[in-house]
Amino acid sequence: MTYSKLFNASLFSILFSACFAFVTVAQQQVNDNFTDEEYEQFVSINQSLAPMQAEVETKMVGILEDKGMEVPRFQELMQAQRQGNIMDATDDPEEIATFNEAGQEIMKVQQESQQKLQKHITDNGMEIKKFQEMSIAYNQSPKVKEKVDAKMEELENQ
């Protein structure tokens, strides 16, 4: 399996969680009433984000490679750090230093990409809040997921 595939799921969640950290999804009523135009906009924006996502992934993997750390190990240490027990995952001070250095560089890349992401969304005529609502709805509402997936398939078959 390639680094990109290993990194892909967490990358997008990292980008969106960092980009839209101010949203609380838990116990939130999901809006699933969107216009056809909003669905088309959302799908179009998502498709045009793919090259941006690939570029960010490449940069992040490159940082890890430059530091001599593999993606799965970085993810493992990141998870341990989030849970407050990085010392359980490693007792090697050099590995922790490498992890911290790579993490700082990755955070810088994320911050830059978040700004580009937000600008891209608004430049394509959608408010960040609406894009956010639709992203949440896509992940939580079968109705929205079905409509978005159908629109994506429709565009791919054109």
Image (cartoon, grey):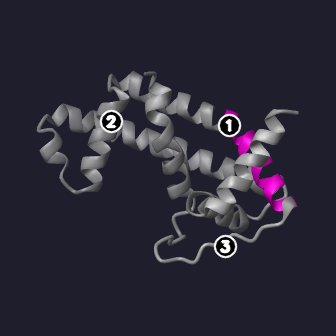
Q: Is residue 4 above or below residue 38?
A: above
Quadrant in the picture for residue 135: bottom right
Q: Residues within 10 Å of mark 2 (few under 14, many from 20)?
A: some
Range covered by the magenta-colored residues: 37-51
Judging by the rendered image, the residue that carries numbered circle 2 is 74
Q: Position of residue 110 (x, y in %)?
A: 53, 46
Q: Earlier in the sequence, mark 3 or mark 2?
A: 3
Residue marked by disc 1: 50
On the image, the x and y values in percent for residue 34 come to: 78, 67
Q: Along the horizontal axis of the image, is 22 left or right of 63?
A: right
Q: Amino acid at mark 3?
A: Asn
Q: In whole angstroms, how far apart are the C-alphas of marks 3 and 1?
A: 25 Å
Is residue 118 among the parts visible in the rendering? no
Decide which of 118, 44 is in the foreground and name it. Answer: 44
Q: Quadrant of the N terminus?
A: top left
Residue 93 is tagged as none
> Where 151 sits versus 138, above or below?
above
Give the alpha-carbon distance from disc 2 to disc 1, as whole Å.
Answer: 23 Å
Q: Residue at x 25, y 37 (%)?
A: 97
Q: Residue at x 46, y 40 (%)?
A: 106
Comes first in the chain, label 3 or label 1: 3
- Residue 130's x, y, as percent? 72, 66
Q: Which residue carries the number 3 mark?
A: 31
Drawn side of residue 129 relative to residue 107, left or right:
right
Q: Residues within 10 Å of mark 3 (few under 14, many from 20)?
A: some
Q: Quadrant of the C terminus?
A: top right
